[in-house]
Image (cartoon, rainbow, N blue to C red):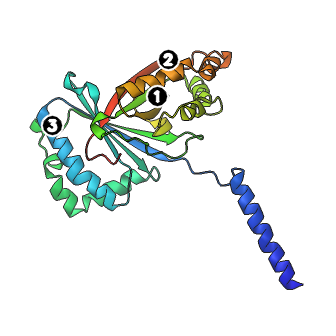
Amino acid sequence: MKSFFAKFILFAICFFSINSFAYGGNKPKKEIYQLTVYQYTTAAQETVLNNYLKNALLPALHKMNYKNIGVFKALANDTAAVKMLYVYMPIKNLEDQQVIAEKLSKDATYQTAGTEYINAVYTNAAYKRMEVIILKAFSLAPQMQLPKLTAPKNERVYELRSYESASEKIFANKVHMFNEGGEVDLFKSLNFNAIFYAEVIAGSHMPNLMYMTSFENKADRDAHWKSFVDSPVWKKLSAMPEYQHNVSHIDIMFLQPLEYSDF
């Protein structure tokens, strides 16, 4: 009798555990992302930044078991007076920034490899400005996804979009449109190869959300967006009264991954 009872309890635990997982009892935790944007103006600064990221920072972060770090150059850099370099990294939690900084300060290999950047003098700075943006993943895209692309990195196009809203309440409406409204699902159904969808929780432009999609090349990007705009699902969603005027400003950045980027 005791043996039967024990087996019954074990079966019940397994049954409810499996069903809890199947019905969302163990939803994946929403990831935190750090997006660092370097502004620079000279070829010398670009060289210093690339050497630092490639030879010092990324190897040190990999050693700490931080993976899937993306490094991107804005495609408009060749003609822009102020050029942009983007570093995207999933972090475990908000305390990670301090933990990483402390570990880097004690990492002799990192300090040596990054000395040109770390010890740059004020008359010869490594960049013009640096911005750090902290994001939290959406509920329907709680974890980043690596893109399924076959093109060489120097042909790929990564599209980073920032959608600002006029108020916190209106911003929440746009986030709802992405999640419960079905915008994320539409992107997935059209194979936009999205890396992440997230809301900005700390940054210079708020309230806003950001997301990154990826394509084999510019023509592939244009074809995907045509299918999105022409989609009956989007036409219906964008016409709904409850989702009107929930974006006040959009920034679109076309990026290309550098050869040492993780993806």
Secondary structure beneath dot 2 equals: loop
Amino acid type at image mark 3: Gln
**Mark 3 neighbour class, 10 Å CA radius: few under 14, some 14 to 19, many 20 or more:** some
Q: Earlier in the sequence, mark 3 or mark 2?
A: 3
Residue at image location 13% in from the left, 44% down from the top? 120
Q: Is residue 262 above or below residue 220?
A: below
Residue at image location 28% in from the left, 57% down from the top? 60
Left or right? Give the position of 52 relative to 234.
left
* Spot occupied by residue 37 in the image (x, y as percentages of width and height): 31, 36
Residue contact at pointers 1 and 3, CB within 8 angstroms: no
**Inter-mark Cα distance, 3 to 2:** 34 Å
**Mark 1 neighbour class, 10 Å CA radius: few under 14, some 14 to 19, many 20 or more:** some
Amino acid type at image mark 2: Ser
Mark toward the viewer: 2 or 1: 2
Residue closer to the observer: 68 or 241: 68
Question: Which residue, given by chain and number where applicable, does mark 3 sit on?
Answer: 45
Amino acid type at image mark 1: Met
Mark toward the viewer: 1 or 3: 3
Question: Which part of the image, by quadrant, shows the C terminus?
Answer: top left
Secondary structure beneath dot 1 equals: loop
* Spot occupied by residue 169 in the image (x, y as percentages of width and height): 60, 25
Q: Earlier in the sequence, mark 1 or mark 3?
A: 3
**Inter-mark Cα distance, 1 to 3:** 29 Å
Residue closer to the observer: 108 or 21: 21
Question: Which part of the image, by quadrant, shows the N terminus?
Answer: bottom right
Question: Which residue is outermost to the left?
Answer: 123
Which of the labelled discs sits on residue 248, or is there none? Answer: 2
**Inter-mark Cα distance, 2 to 1:** 11 Å
Question: Which residue, given by chain and number where applicable, does mark 1 sit on?
Answer: 206
Residue closer to the observer: 157 or 200: 157
Q: Is residue 205 visible?
A: no
* Spot occupied by residue 229 in the image (x, y as percentages of width and height): 53, 19
